[in-house]
Amino acid sequence: MNRIQRDEYEGREFAIAWRDAALENGEGAAAVELATQSLAALVRRELAAAWAACATFEHVALGYLGASSALILFFAENLAHPFRLIGMQAFVAALILALCWIEARVAELAGAGEENGIFSPAGTEEQTDRSVCPTLGFWHFWRCWYPHLFFLFCFEELGKLVHLVQPGWQDAKLMAFDHWLTGVHPSVWLEQFATPARNDFMQFVYLTYFTYLLVVGGVLYYRRDWRGYWSVMTYSAVGYAIGYVIAIFFPIESPWFSMAGAWHGPLQGGAATSVINFIEHYGRVRGAAFPSEHVAGAVAATWGAWRHRRWLFWVMLPLVACMCLSTIWGRYHYVADVFGGFITGTLGYVIGRRLMVMKGSAEPHRLTLVPLEHQD
């Protein structure tokens, strides 16, 4: 008998002896059963508390993860590592639930809330001065700002899901649509107007995409308008989720790839062009071009500014309009992508508003957590 076999044998002997002793001793068996039941009840209770701590944004985010995981499972034969992707999505979902649970628990223990335990970060007003509790402020900050990391994760993941359903690219359809609509291939036609200065301006406004949701969210966060803040995040989440699902079923790789060689050369520019070239080199996702998530995210954030900070809407509007043009100028998108992004971003706003006023999902944005000493 080798060492491994001996260890396994001794392990079985120990387990059998422990079981027999527990069965002979009624109190021991009862204690084991009670401990097992208590652990199961604790797990169920904390999972329920984590779900209760989720607001409308989390419902949308977790819903997207669930839907995409179901698609991965259904079309698993089209992926090299489907269960690795499902495992990653489960990990992200667990992180979201854990963050919501921790922030809610810390707020409860810190005495946040007056009537129903704590006040959600999605609430209509601030009831607790979070600056007096650094721990609460830390978790509250991450609860508010993690959506940006979630959006980035989902977009980067699309690079692995673009051929989940369709094995080939569908760019020819959008190229034909653009030509039918304009009589030319827009990104090729625009090359005649390219100069280093114009290129750099267009690349600069293309880069402004990354700031829209940060700016709108930052203004609302600074003003402690939690209802407005989480409304804007929800508009964006719905718009992105719709776009992500469309991209999975209708893979488009963008003119940058499908029309390579149609131009006389790369776009030359200055600092902004260098920055965007660096970002595209290390962060480009091949596929997921339709609808344009740049346009969808910018439109959803702009509608959020219209709804909650009208002055900010008028500041953003010309930049967003130029950014939409820059996606074609820079050879990143077709005109059809821009139209699709505008529609999905607007749908995100319309559906998100409805979700935020549905009874029990967002109004009045309060979490009813039973104090620890009153839980069964």
Image (cartoon, rainbow, N blue to C red):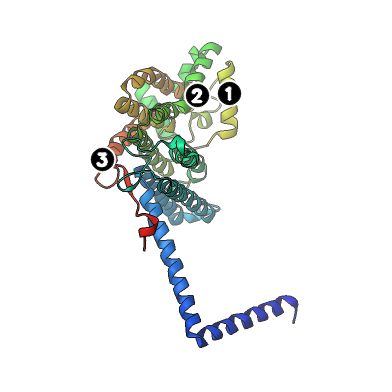
Q: Is mark 1 on a helix, strand or loop?
A: helix
Q: Which mark is residue 230?
A: none
- Measuring 33% from the left and 28% from the top, which residue is drawn there? 303
Local packing at callout 2 (Cα closer than 10 Å; few below 14, some 14-19, many 20+) is some
- Measuring 74% from the left and 82% from the top, which residue is drawn there? 1
Q: Can residue 267 be seen in this view?
A: no
Mark 2 in CB contact with mark 1 (< 8 angstroms): yes
Q: In this view, does 136 lie above or below 7?
A: above
Q: Position of residue 293 (x, y in %)?
A: 43, 33
Q: What kind of residue is marked 2?
A: Leu
Looking at this view, is 306 or 34 the one in front?
Answer: 34
Q: What element carries label 2?
A: helix
Q: Position of residue 128 (x, y in %)?
A: 38, 38
Q: What kind of residue is marked 1?
A: Val
Residue to which mark 2 is pinned = 207
Q: Which mark lies nearer to you, 3 or 1?
A: 3
- Measuring 52% from the left and 88% from the top, which residue is drawn there? 24
Residue to which mark 1 is pinned = 275
Local packing at callout 3 (Cα closer than 10 Å; few below 14, some 14-19, many 20+) is some
Local packing at callout 1 (Cα closer than 10 Å; few below 14, some 14-19, many 20+) is some
Label whose residue precedes the other's in the sequence (3 or 1): 1
Label whose residue precedes the other's in the sequence (2 or 1): 2
Q: What kind of residue is marked 3?
A: Val
Q: How far apart are marks 3 and 1 (CA)?
A: 41 Å
Label whose residue precedes the other's in the sequence (3 or 2): 2
Q: Is residue 183 above or below residue 258?
A: above
Residue to which mark 3 is pinned = 357
Q: How far apart are marks 3 and 2 (CA)?
A: 33 Å
On-image quarter of the C terminus:
bottom left
